[in-house]
Image (tube, coloured by chain):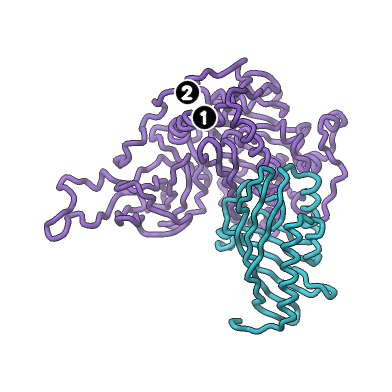
Amino acid sequence: MDGAVFSTDQKARVDDLYARYAETICDGDLEAWPDFFIEDCRYHVRPRGNHERGQLLGPIYSESRGALVDRVLAIRKSMVYMPRAVCYVVGTIRIVEARDDGLTARSMFSAYHTLETGDSEVLMVGRTFDELVDDDGALKFRERIVVFDTERVPGALVFPV
Amino acid sequence: MHDGHPDIPETPGDSPIANGRDWPGPEMARVPLWVYSDRDNYQQELDRIFYGSHWHYVGVDVEVPEQGDFKRATIGERSVLMVRGKDDQINVLLNSCAHRGTEVCQKQFGNDKVLTCPYHQWTYDLEGNLTGVPFLKGLKGQGGFPEDFDRSEHGLKKLRVEVVNGGVFASFDPDVMPYADYIGPVMMKYVTRVFSGKKLRVLGYQRQKLRGNWKLYVENIKDPYHATLLHVFLISFGIYRIDQIGVTEQDERTGAHNVFASMRDMDVTEEAAEEMASFTPDYELQDPRMVVPVKEFPDDISIMIQTFFPGLIVQQQTNSLQIRYIVPLGPDEFELQWTYLGYDDDDEEMIQRRLHMSNLTGPAGYISVDDSEVMEFSGAGVRPNPGNVAITELDGRTAAPPEGKHMITESCIRGFYSHYREVMGY
């Protein structure tokens, strides 16, 4: 839908959602992260090569909000890792298509992590391909496919992106 | 075919000992920390281990199904090409032009009729033979290569190759022993559970760069001691615990290849629970799909993790099938390459199950995050302390496999270093 015009209100709601998502990652407010998704959702993080070959596999393959809650619990309770901060920068957010049942949108992002050593490094750069729906008055992700270019991940991907 | 690269020793193992340091005892129960950081030692590892008389994993045959298909792989620091040639044979060629050493191929995967170096367009057939040299005769009688320039002497370096039930292995040593002898009958018995000859399917790849020496990862996989202590997630779901029914086996020839195989068991004994401070029996998942297996193999082995000298790991973790391959990036860093597999005849339900289970491993794996992080903690701890030693004394001091084949042992690490010392001359 090249050149499609969407209402200022729609664009503002989408921008706000993406800004709050990024802030939640940057703030380390993991417990709030699953609430960006509806219950019956899909959240995949996969390298660009797999994506382009039609392979669905990647670091994260979640097919429900419950799976996101499980991941948060594991990050808090069971995973062993060096403390870190993640800075998630989102840009060029665009509504690709608006339908009665929701929106298709995409964005570009870069994520940096800063370990206890104090050095910041690029964790990932990539794109998100998203399906958004209105969930009781709030815009939420029904699907978020994160496709990253940084195939050789530096260390571990502890926090979601 | 002639060797266009005289720098690669045809008879490996003739370079001098790296640093003249002694290896501390008693027996096989110590590892000097300089092996994780010494640059001369690392260079000797490349010469003797990675470019020497050993077998290395380059891929699975289904990655190059058609004639002309190729995939880039790495052995040590050298890029190689796995190419499906004529007569359906798989060739492994050094990715370095015989002319000026340039990498011939940059793409990860591709298909072509010939391999052409982008620099001066020297062209090789799918077997690595040099077939085309621009301006071979010069132009209008000027220039050109000398009369006695023989193209047949300047092919791409061709590695020795064996395809074993779909797994493709290569060696720089043309006289390396057959793969079956290299891993031995016991390791072959286990690995052919997964590589049964049934056609494979690649579900995808993952890659990580970790700041530690490559051997630290091999040791990690050879170490059931940490698995039951570090990995809260693993032990809480009974995916693996040291007290489960299982076996440790090492190959008879070197002791450096080994397997752990265990049966899933949700009951934990009181004695074991007391030793495992991280054990959390009330851990519950909202979406348990990544830990719900179906029986797939004739036996009851639910987790099998096998390491092959130097840096190949084959794992069956219930229904998740993975290959991990270690690429050294200097003494202080390595790349971990994961290939996730299924079988060609998997139905959609099985593919979904394997994808859900893949959450346990890889850069964001519920289990593997711990190991990735510990690799970096280990790297940070050993680098500045080359004069210190590591203790590998759990269950004895020799490289012999544990009596009764139990898993409360560091014998596989001792086995690795017993062979390593032999190869390296320590």
Image coordinates of residue A102 in percent, x first then y, are 74, 77
Viewer-nearest residue: B88 or A106: A106
Mark 1 and mark 2 in contact? Answer it, CB < 8 Å.
yes
Residue B211 image position (x, y, % from top left): 59, 40
Q: Residue furthest left?
A: B141
Amino acid type assigned to the residue bearing label 2 in the image: Asn
| Horizontal arrangement in the rendering, residue B275 relative to residue B123 (left or right) | right
Q: Which chain is cyan?
A: A
Image quadrant where residue B257 sits: top right
Q: List x then y, in percent, for residue B322.
A: 62, 46
Looking at the figure, which quarter contains the N terminus of chain B? top left
Q: Who is closer to the viewer here, A105 or B3?
A: A105
Indicate the quadrant where residue A35 lies.
bottom right
Chain represented in purple: B
Does residue A6 sit above or below B195 in this rendering? below
Task: Please tell me whether mark 2 sits on a helix, a strand or a loop.
Answer: loop
Residue visible at 39% across and 50% down in the picture:
B103
Q: Which residue is mark 1?
A: B38
Q: Residues within 10 Å of mark 2 (few under 14, many from 20)?
A: few
Q: Chain of mark 1?
A: B
Q: Which residue is mark 2?
A: B19
Q: Residue at (81%, 58%) from the top-left corner?
A: A66
